[in-house]
Amino acid sequence: MAPETSNSRLERMEEKIDKLSEAIVALARVEEKISNLEHTNSALMSQIIAIEQRSHRNEDNINIIKFEQAKDSNTLQGLRKFFWMFVSSVLAAGFLVWFTVLTSHSAPK
């Protein structure tokens, strides 16, 4: 009986060693997956940071463009007002000359 018990004991030990080796392999796979995830995470974070920096630069450029547009808009608005004042003055002068000519022709001498 002693040899049988030692054989069964050895078989149980071998089974336990096999289970331990499987567990170690599984841990190694998990560690590899974690390492890959960390690498992917760091790559994604660097891309996010780059996109954020580009976004800030674009916002700055948009603010500059808005400022320039507002400045140009004020200038254009002033030119528009000047144009309409000029057109109104020319029309008023034209009507004045026209009425003057009409009244001078129709007036009895």
Image (cartoon, rainbow, N blue to C red):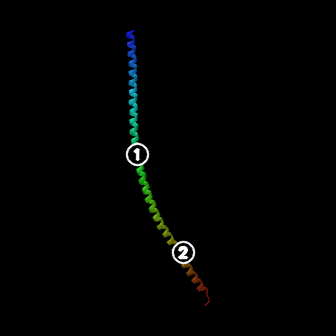
Against 43, residue 76 (above or below) is below
Question: What residue is drawn where x is 40% and y is 47%?
Answer: 49
Against 40, residue 101 (above or below) is below
| Towards the viewer: 95 or 66 | 66
> The residue under label 2 is which amino acid type?
Ser
Q: Is residue 57 left or right of residue 80?
A: left
Instruction: Identify the image quadrant of residue 16.
Output: top left
Question: What residue is drawn where x is 38% and y is 27%?
Answer: 24
Quarter of the rendering occupied by the C terminus: bottom right
Against 21, residue 34 (above or below) is below
Against 93, residue 14 (above or below) is above
Q: Nearer the viewer, mark 1 or mark 2?
A: 1
Residue furthest out toward the front? 2
Q: Which mark is residue 61?
A: none
Question: What residue is drawn where x is 42% and y is 46%?
Answer: 48
Q: Is residue 76 left or right of residue 27?
A: right
| Towards the viewer: 31 or 82 | 31
Where residue 51 appears, as percent x and y from the top left, is 42, 48
> The residue under label 1 is which amino acid type?
Gln
Where residue 55 appears, as percent x and y from the top left, is 43, 51
Q: What is the secondary structure assignment of the residue under circle 2?
A: helix
Q: What is the secondary structure assignment of the residue under circle 1?
A: helix
Question: What residue is drawn where x is 56% and y is 81%?
Answer: 96
Disc 1 and disc 2: Cα gap in Å? 60 Å
Where residue 1 appears, as percent x and y from the top left, is 39, 9
Q: Which mark is residue 88?
A: 2
Q: Which residue matches tag 1?
A: 47
Dot 2 crowding, Cα within 10 Å, few <14, some 14–19, many 20+: few
Residue furthest out toward the bottom? 109
Q: Is residue 85 left or right of residue 34?
A: right
